[in-house]
Amino acid sequence: MRPSRPDPMTTARASWILLAAGSSTRFGRTGENPARSKLLESLGADRVIDVTLRALKNALPGARIILVSTPELRDEIGMECAWVNGGQRRQDSARHGILAARETDIALIHDAARPFVTREIVDRLREALRENDAAAPGIPVTDTIRRSNSGEFETLDRSTLLAMQTPQAVWMDVAAPAFEASTGPEEFTDDLAVIAAFGGRIAVTRGDKSNMKITTREDLLHAERILENLNPKS
């Protein structure tokens, strides 16, 4: 840990950057409003976004929440928090959030469509920030993965592969210049890649299968089952 940095477990100020600017095109919606965000879909007695917000507040109480979305979705969500407009790419949306979180020491960049983040996941990330510039949870890949190239197929060694999750925790003193430098044509699929490209030190912590991302309608059904297990009926 750099001497000038506060303790990430106790004194560091933290902000959530909640990415919600996606178009939900893979959700497979039909009907009167096909453009409706999946974040407004029902999950248990609430909406997906409400379950996510509750999880954030439980996982890191007192942290500021910055919503990154379209103005229309912000109005539909109706949450009282800081807001910035989303960008064309994930890294652009994350950069907008980073710029809005400059007064804090740590940012936790999280997909709004992952409603089940826990305090245990966050604590592992904060612990990893003692020695690293950024950290994110990952889970081992269990399926066989093949790379396709012009009709040729290469089987990858799944023992070396991890499926990455969010939140991805970053120190602001590295994240701010790193994301400001990410405006070129190169596309980054997660925040650790931005930090690594800038020369930062990254770590992967233990994730959780329940920390899933809702992308398709089938994912929403799976999320319903997870929520029922978390809140069993008496």
Image: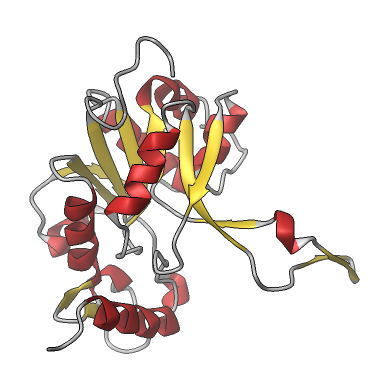
In which quadrant of the rendered view does residue 154 lie? Answer: bottom right
Q: Position of residue 155 (x, y in %)?
A: 84, 66
In this rendering, would 100 be left or right of 203? left
Residue at 62% from the left image edge and 56% from the top image edge = 162
In this rendering, would 197 be left or right of 60? right
User: From the image, which quarter does the C terminus lie in?
Assistant: bottom left
| Residue at the right extreme, as displayed | 152
In which quadrant of the rendered view does residue 230 lie? Answer: bottom left
136 over 172 or under it: above or below:
below
Q: Position of residue 65 (x, y in %)?
A: 19, 44
Q: Of residues 209 and 103, which is closer to you in this image?
A: 209
221 over 103 or under it: above or below:
below
Q: How many marks?
A: 0
Q: Of residues 134 and 96, which is closer to you in this image?
A: 134
Residue at 44% from the left image edge and 78% from the top image edge = 216
User: From the image, which quarter does the N terminus lie in?
Assistant: top left
| Residue at the top extreme, as displayed | 3
Q: Of residues 232 and 150, which is closer to you in this image?
A: 232
Residue at 54% from the left image edge and 33% from the top image edge = 202
Whether residue 192 is visible here, answered yes or no, is: yes
Whether residue 28 is visible here, answered yes or no, is: no
Q: Position of residue 128 (x, y in %)?
A: 44, 35
Q: Position of residue 75 (x, y in %)?
A: 13, 58
What scheme was used to colour the molecule? Answer: secondary structure
| Residue at the front extreme, as displayed | 234
Q: Of residues 233 and 87, which is closer to you in this image?
A: 233
In this rendering, would 225 be left or right of 78? right
Residue at 29% from the left image edge and 32% from the top image edge = 9
In which quadrant of the rendered view does residue 160 lie? Answer: bottom right
